[in-house]
Image (cartoon, rainbow, N blue to C red):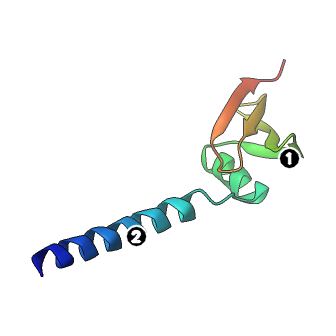
Amino acid sequence: MRLFFKSSLLIAVGMVGMTVTTAHAQPRTISECAQKLTARGFNVIDKDIDDGLYEFEAIKHNQKWDVKMDRQCNILLERIDD
């Protein structure tokens, strides 16, 4: 009986863990990622989707920036546009 309870508990914990992981990896919209940049002090002036990446042009501290993000809003490139 004890083994059955432990096995059931481990299976339940594993299923909850897998559910949380898949929910976290869901792609976000380009607008959600733009809001993340706005929260970091950027003023987003243009946004585009290219090769599966979100690309933004933004202004911060009177400088123009190029920012690329993946579909989970992780910043892959952040540079001043010369």
**Residue 16 drawn at (x, y percent):** 40, 70
User: How many numbered marks appear?
Assistant: 2
Q: In the picture, which quadrant includes the C terminus?
A: top right
The disc placed on residue 47 is 1
* Amino acid identity at mark 1: Lys
Q: Residue at x 60, y 44 (%)?
A: 40
Q: Residue at x 27, y 68 (%)?
A: 10
Seen from the viewer's position, the closer of residues 11 and 64 is 11
Residue 16, relative to residue 63: is it above or below?
below
Horizontal arrangement in the rendering, residue 25 relative to residue 43 (left or right): left
Q: Secondary structure at mark 1?
A: strand
**Residue 43 drawn at (x, y percent):** 75, 45
In this figure, which residue is indicated by the disc labeled 2? 16
Seen from the viewer's position, the closer of residues 75 and 10 is 10
**Residue 31 drawn at (x, y percent):** 76, 58
Q: Secondary structure at mark 2?
A: helix
